[in-house]
Amino acid sequence: MTLLFDLPAAPSVPVLGSEASYPVRRIFCVGRNYAAHALELGNAVDREAPIWFNKAPAALCLSGEVIPYPPGTSNCHYEMEFVVAIGAPAFRVAPEDAMAAVYGYAAGLDMTRRDLQNASKAKGYPWDTGKDFENGAAIAAITPAADFGAVADQRIALVQNGETKQDGTLSDMIWSVPELIADLSRMYHLAPGDLIYTGTPAGVGPVAEGDLLEGTIDGLEPVRLDIGGAE
Ligand code: MN
């Protein structure tokens, strides 16, 4: 069978210490996973179940890029996040078995068209236009899990133009990494190439043309993004 046209290859993420890069199949994201961030957006802290949404692989962009200010918004926000890269199949795994599915970790930015997300939330509509857009999922190089060690109280922070805006620790997460993987695996056959953005600490805010965003997590490569002009 021949195809009418060729699609771009799957986007991929560099891996520290490896010549090979990590191809991306799906991007899962969790909302309101840090209590102080849920409260700053006026949401109740909810331990009922994680709130999931997705971004297409076409939303991926790599650390170090200059991205245009996204179209369709006048209130684009940064959200600094710890990203989990899945490296083995996981389906209906218990939290105590979930970490075996992890390949590694990366620093990422869940860029958000907050005005569109808020309008969708107010109407009970899906968040897609607010969350899933080109360059909306920034990511730095992946560090293999064995090199990172245990997910504990590593610092996660976001600096905008030299000013610290977000500052928390991974232990602030409401749902832990194994709990997130276990919950997703109830609904999906997780597989290598699946990324999980695990939510953002308090301090999210708008970006503007000319901004430099620098996100750091102890033990990982920082994620850097320059915000260019509108297209
Ligand atoms: Mn987020």
Image: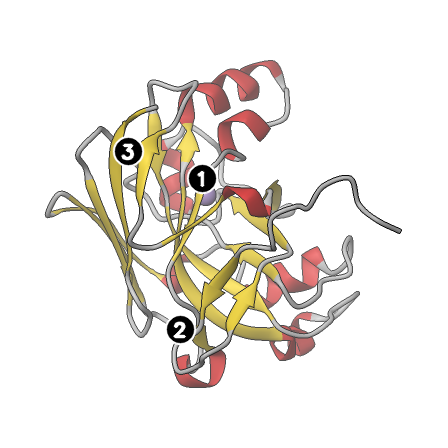
Q: Secondary structure at mark 1?
A: loop
Residue at 47%, 63% (x, y): give it: 13
Q: Secondary structure at mark 3?
A: strand
Position above or below: 59 against 108: above
Task: Give the total of numbered labels.
Answer: 3
| Amino acid type at mark 3 | Gly
Task: Please identify the quadrant where the C terminus is shown.
Answer: top left
Q: Nearer the viewer, mark 1 or mark 2?
A: 1
Residue 112 placement: quadrant: top left
Mark 3 surroundings within 10 Å by alpha-carbon count, few (fewer than 14), some (14 through 19), many (20 or more): some
| Amino acid type at mark 1 | Gly
Q: CA distance from mark 1 to mark 2?
A: 27 Å
Residue at 66%, 68% (x, y): give it: 192
Using residue 31 as the reference point, say whether residue 36 is left or right of it: left
Using residue 28 as the reference point, say whether residue 209 is left or right of it: left
Residue carrying label 3? 205
Residue carrying label 2? 152
Q: Where's residue 3, x and y in %?
A: 80, 45
Mark 2 surroundings within 10 Å by alpha-carbon count, few (fewer than 14), some (14 through 19), many (20 or more): few
Residue at 46%, 69% (x, y): give it: 105
Of labels 1 and 2, earlier in sequence is: 1
Identify the colour scheme used: secondary structure
Q: Where's residue 84, x and y in %?
A: 51, 64
Q: Nearer the viewer, residue 70 or 47?
A: 70
Q: Secondary structure at mark 2?
A: loop
| Amino acid type at mark 2 | Ala
Q: Where's residue 132, x and y in %?
A: 54, 35
Question: Which of the numbered marks, if any, corresponds to residue 136?
Answer: 1
Q: CA distance from mark 2 to mark 3?
A: 26 Å
Using residue 214 as the reference point, say whether residue 95 is left or right of it: right
